[in-house]
Image (cartoon, rainbow, N blue to C red):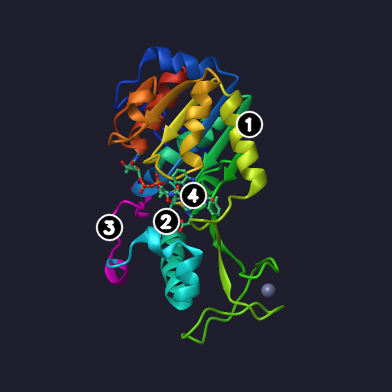
Amino acid sequence: METSRESFDRSASACAIPEALARRLRTARRVAVLTGAGISAESGVPTFRDAQTGIWAHFDPLELATPAAFARQPRVVWDWYAWRRELVAAAKPNPGHFALAAIERRVADFLLITQNVDGLHQAAGSTRIVELHGNIARVKCARGCGSVDAWDDTDGSEPPRCPQCGAFLRPDVVWFDEMLPAEALLRAEQAAGDCELMLVVGTSAEVHPAAALPEAARAGGATVAEVNPNPTPLTDRVDYPLRGRSGIVLPALFAAAWPPSA
Ligand code: BV8
Ligand code: ZN
């Protein structure tokens, strides 16, 4: 086992990695990675597919994560994010996150494109990253005054209000029917179009425009590998469908590409 910087088992070979893929990763100069909720599942963060638990069991996430829901039930949506924020705050990155941070340190031109709002990639040491859908740890004014670091959440009947304009505060995430941050999306589309290899990890590949990035990579001539224990709409169109959990497969992929000095 290596030092904590790469706190995952570098000699992991718990699953067979095609030698051609390992060579592609080792020799690629431009690599892009797209991640979804599945990479954080082994850190105890429920995916969007996983049934909501407890009081949220009756709510459809696709329902709650919308401007319409916030307009209709601002406090309910605020509380849902407060609940998820606590879950995420207690979660630790897993070997899948650490393996991607280690791959980043070995590749010249690398970009990690995440749909996750949990910040676990950064906690694992990833630095060349774009958050397509925002980050749940940040809160901002719903009317656009900008982000707010501290808020008083005593009045339970409605969300806290913006100290500047009095509008409700909301999580700094991208809701359905909302535009993605333009700069992040542009960087993601460029990296997808230019990369030689794209790893697609832990996503059901159904939410757009993120789900279109693997297609852009293929159109650019890149090799595409998918890491997922379940098939997705993408599986039949990738070069390497690696069936397994990212906390197992990604350390094995790293070890296959950069075998611990024999
Ligand atoms: C927009 C932040 C313009 C909030 C999120 C084109 C075609 C069809 C629909 C559309 C389209 N273009 C736009 C749309 C509409 C919509 C959309 O895509 N709808 C879908 C449902 C069909 N897109 C939008 O609204 C986007 N905005 O288009 O703006 C616009 C503007 C105005 C008016 C009209 C248009 C905004 C999308 C972003 C929404 N925000 N998150 C929050 O987190 O609360 S999306 C959210 O859901 C996540 O960020 C993520 O993107 C998605 C969930 O998907 P995954 O992450 O993949 O997770 P999921 O649970 O689905 O799957 C988990 C996977 O992991 C599974 O495959 C499982 O097998 C796997 N897994 C499980 N365990 C493991 C594992 N894998 C590896 N290891 C394991 N251990
Ligand atoms: Zn404001």
Q: Is residue 166 above or below residue 223?
A: below
Residue shown at 53% from the left, 81% from the top: 153
Q: Which of pointers 2 and 4 lies earlier in the amino acid sequence?
A: 2
Instruction: Say if mark 2 contacts mark 4, CB within 8 Å.
Output: yes
The reply to whether residue 262 is in sight is no
Residue under label 1, please give it. Answer: 190
Separation (CA) of disc 1 from disc 4: 24 Å
Q: Quadrant of residue 72?
A: bottom left
Quadrant of ligand 2: it is bottom right
**Label 2's element?**
loop
- Label 2: how many Cα within 10 Å (few below 14, some 14–19, many 20+): some
In the image: residue 127, left or right of residue 254: right
Q: Is residue 165 left or right of residue 87?
A: right
Q: Is residue 18 above or below residue 38?
A: above
For disc 2, the marked residue is 91
Residue that label 3 marks: 51
**Residue kind at label 4, given as amino acid type:** Leu
Query: Which residue has dot 4 on it?
Result: 120
Rounded to the nearest angstrom, the CA distance separating label 3 from label 1 is: 34 Å
Q: Secondary structure at mark 1?
A: helix
Q: Secondary structure at mark 3?
A: loop
Between tags 2 and 1, which lies in front?
A: 1
Query: Which residues are the magenta region?
Result: 42-56
Q: Determine whether the residue tagged by mark 4 lies in a helix, strand or loop.
A: helix
Which labelled disc corresponds to residue 124?
none
Nearer the camera: disc 1 or disc 4 = 1
